[in-house]
Structure formats: C-alpha cells, structure tokens
Amino acid sequence: MNKCRNTDHPHCTFWVAPGQLVCEGGHAQPAPAAGADTPGQTMGQSYGLLSAVRNQRAPQASVVAPAQVQEAEPSYERLAAPIRVRPQLRISGFDPRAAGGRQTLKMELRGMPGDCAPRLALQLTSELIPNGASRQQFVRSVDGDWCPVFVEFSSRDREHGQYQITTQILSQLPGQPARKWECTFIILVPRLDASLTEIHRIFLSTHKNVRVMADDASIARVSGQGGDSMDIDVTARNAGIAHVDLSAPAGKVDLGFTTIAWDEDLIEIDMPRTGPAHPHPSRAASFVNAAPEAGTQRHVRLFALDECVFGRFELVDPEAHALLHHYTPDGIDTAGLTRRLSGRHAVIRRGSHGFEIEDVSRYGLLLDGVWPGKHKPVPLRLGMRIELSASIKGIAVLEVTGLLPHGVILHRIDDGARAECFIVLAPDTHPGYPLRRAQTAPAAAALPLLFHLDGGFWHLDAVTGKETALAPTVQADKLSRVMPHTRFASDAYPESWIIRTGALAHDTETAAPAEADHV
C-alpha cells in the first residue's frame, strides 16, 4: 500500500492499492516513473524529488506573504524551471570584538558570469579604509574559480557606529562594453568598553538565520543537513545544554566562533554602450602658463599612473615619466649635474597606507636629509623634503606640498621652483565631493583640484562640485584656481620633442595626437 501522491493534495492521508489510479479520496495518481520497477520505488523517487524542491533554499531568505502560501507547493512542471543565480560577494573574517585593532576582510566572488574578463578591478570606498579607497583585482584561476582578495583596515581612533563600505567590480574586455557590479555593506565599530554580550546582541545575532537558545536548564538541540548558507547561533546559559549535530555526507562543515561571514548580492549596473565618457583620454598632461606670476609655475605636470617614475631628462627613450633637469640661477643645465640623476631615480606609488616613495637609483636620494635605503618604500608626509641625489647636494630638490586621498603634489624648492611642479594622481579614481582628509600647504592649495577618471583628467570645482573634462579645447583660465593665460596640453612636456619608442611609451601615450607646440 502506498500513500496518495497527488501533488495538489500533499496532505491527503488515504492509501492507494498497487495498480489503482485514484486514492480513496478520489485524487488522481501520477503515472509510474520510467524505469521504476515497483510502486514503492516510484513513490520514493517522487517523494524525494518533491522533498528536494521543498527543502531547497534560495541564495537570500525571504518571508512568504500570506497570499503566496497557496503557491508554495511546487508542481512537477516547476521542477524543471532553471533557478537564476545572482552574483554574490562573500565577506568573511570580520570580528567586531577587535575594537580599536587591525581587521582583515576576506572577499570571494560567487556566481559571476562566465563571459566576464579574467581580471576584475575591485574598488572599495569607505572611511575605514586608509586614504578612503582601495584598488585591487580579482584574478581567475586555471580551474575557473576566483582567487580571494584580502582588505585590511583599522578601527583605531574611529568613532563607534556603523560604517559603509561601497564595493565596485569592473569587467573590461577589449572591444566590448564595460560591465560593472556594485554592492554596499555595513561594518559595525563597537565602543572600546563594549562587553561581549552587547556586541553579540547588537551585531552578531543579526547575521544568523538560525538561532537556538537554551536558558534556565532547558535543552537546545539542532540536527539535520548543514549548508553553506546556514549560519547557526547556539547559546546555552544557566546550566542549559546545547547540542549541534550537522550531518554532511560530502565535504566538510566549517564552524566559526571568532569571526562572522555573510553574502552580499552584486547588482549589475547598466553601463552606457557609447564608448569612453572622457572626450580626451590621456595619462600624462600639463597646464602651461604663458605669463606666470610671482610664486606660480610655468608648467604643472600631471601624471595618472599606478607607478610614476622620476628620473633624468632624456630626449630619446627616457626611462622615467617625470623628467628632471638640474636648474642653476642661469637656467637649465642639460649636461652638468643633470647626468648625476639616474634614468630611473625614484618611484612614487599608492601603497596600502597612502602614497610612498622608493629609491631605485644608482646615486641615492635623501628624505629629510636621511637616506632610506634602496628598494625600501617610505610613506610620504606633508612637508617632506626629497633630494635627488644623496652624494651631491642641490641637483633636484622637491617638497611634498599636498597629500590628497587620490594624489600627491610635489613642488620644486631649488632654482627650478618657478619652472615646474608635479601632480601624481591615482588612475581612474574619483576623490569624492566634498574632498576629505586632504593635507595641503599654501602652494598646493592654490592649484586647481584635479582627478583622473574614465581614462582622462577632470577638473573639480571645490565650491560647486562641478566636474569639467580637460581637453586642449577647454578654456582653462575659466576654471576655478587656474591662473590667467593658462592652457591645457595633452603632453606632460609639450615644450620638448621627446621620442618614446620603448615599453614606457604605452604608459603615457594619449588617445589624441600630441599638440604641435614643441619648441
């Protein structure tokens, strides 16, 4: 004898004799499954299939409305419907009890489309992250999985409360439109004197979808099949007994008691399909002032590179991006002490703790009069004095006059002070408005606020927040903090015929042809 197997009446308790097509209640029975030898086997297959669908859990739990209860029982036609998998960002390793200390978040991608790029750019923006932003990459392994990314931050000297972390993932394949996914999650920074019980009640328990408590000598018991999306919080107090039994026939069950983990849905943003948004893409440019006033520079050289190399000026195949001359009271000394600068003298890059400088030269450099050692990155600070080189004084001397969340400003403080200054920006990074955590000296505060995004340079009005794409056709002197008689050039050195034929040319080449204003 078998029970009624009609899917429209799952709670029917009438028995069905072998070979009958209806039960005692008049409910039609499904036809025997192909390959079934006995009615008992047919019943087991149908019941197992129906139970699997009933017990299947969606990526994100949702509350079923009362009007939807009658639709909760699936039919056989619905069993074959494909389930849409939404891309998710798995976040783990966070422990809010480490108040005032270093934290490390582990981020993993799940459910990403197979046609996305093998390298995905990850950009995180938050007040918790050093300098307000962090840029990393997700890399696909040989077997198709995505290697995890680790993000470090510290809650030291941070006000307790909730902090947003905005995540952007960008996929760019040659010849195809860019694809972008976004999500925003909340991190709780508790008070330094918060107890473990308070932290657990406020934050930890909200990230559990199963919570079992045993109080006053009662017994809490959990048993069944554990899954990846099942986070269990079991508490036993006052001589209570808590028992957890998760049977896992395949794989393993990970129980984490010190950290928490959760999934965030990645929402794909509808990106424009009309090509680059910037009308004049470039990674190296300059502002040229035809009539510089007292205290201003004739050239403001702009660079938007992951690593900006400072080195000796060469007309043919220079090894650096920012090219330096030795200046005397009479002008440029092209042959004398300029030759004591290495082709690659120093590298400025954006590190995990802000912008830093590294000595890669033959002749060394001095930071505030001290040689840091070769290949030892040193964080830049406001007012730091950079001397190139260490053996001969005064060849080229720079000072850090501005530290921005997305860039650094360097002014010359030698005889070339009126000739040039340098602005090194993080590529494709928006500083946000209003600008926060900016440290500037008066010389840097007088310069325009610039950033690099969508492959080109932009001007940001610090008062109104208006953004203007910079191109040679823009009237630069109409922009805020731009001196009169100033124009924008699509080359960092428009006054010289510099020929780049090596690999370095690909770092600084522009999408538009260089201006014909060389002398």
Image (cartoon, rainbow, N blue to C red):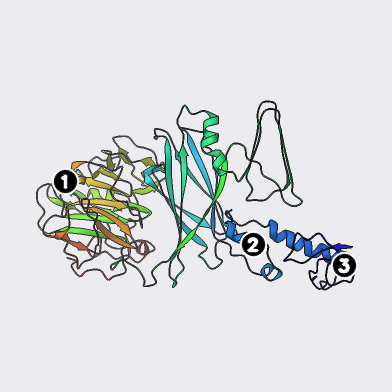
Q: Do the numbered discs 1 and 3 sit on residues whose CB atoms are within 8 Å? A: no
Locate residue 52 relative to residue 190 in the image: left or right.
right
**Quadrant location of residue 222?**
top right
**Residue drawn at x 43%, y 41% as measured from the top left:** 162
Q: Which residue is mark 2?
A: 70
Percent across and percent down for residue 146 are 57, 57
Locate the C terminus by quadrant.
Answer: bottom left
**Quadrant location of residue 244?**
top right
Cα gap from disc 1 to disc 2, whole angstroms: 83 Å
> Disc 1 vs disc 2: which is toward the camera?
2
Depicted 227 relative to depicted 469: above or below: above
Q: Which residue is mark 3?
A: 39
User: Mark 2 or mark 3: which comes first in sequence?
Assistant: 3
- Does residue 357 appear anywhere in the picture? no
Kind of element beneath mark 2 = helix
**Residue drawn at x 70%, y 28% as measured from the top left:** 217
Q: Residues within 10 Å of mark 1 (few under 14, many from 20)?
A: some
Three-letter code for the amino acid on which mark 3 is drawn: Pro
Q: Residues within 10 Å of mark 2 (few under 14, many from 20)?
A: few
**Residue drawn at x 89%, y 69% as measured from the top left:** 37
Locate residue 375 relative to residue 217 in the image: left or right.
left
Percent across and percent down for residue 333 are 19, 52
- Does residue 277 appear anywhere in the picture? yes
Cα gap from disc 1 to disc 3, whole angstroms: 97 Å
> Disc 2 vs disc 3: which is toward the camera?
2
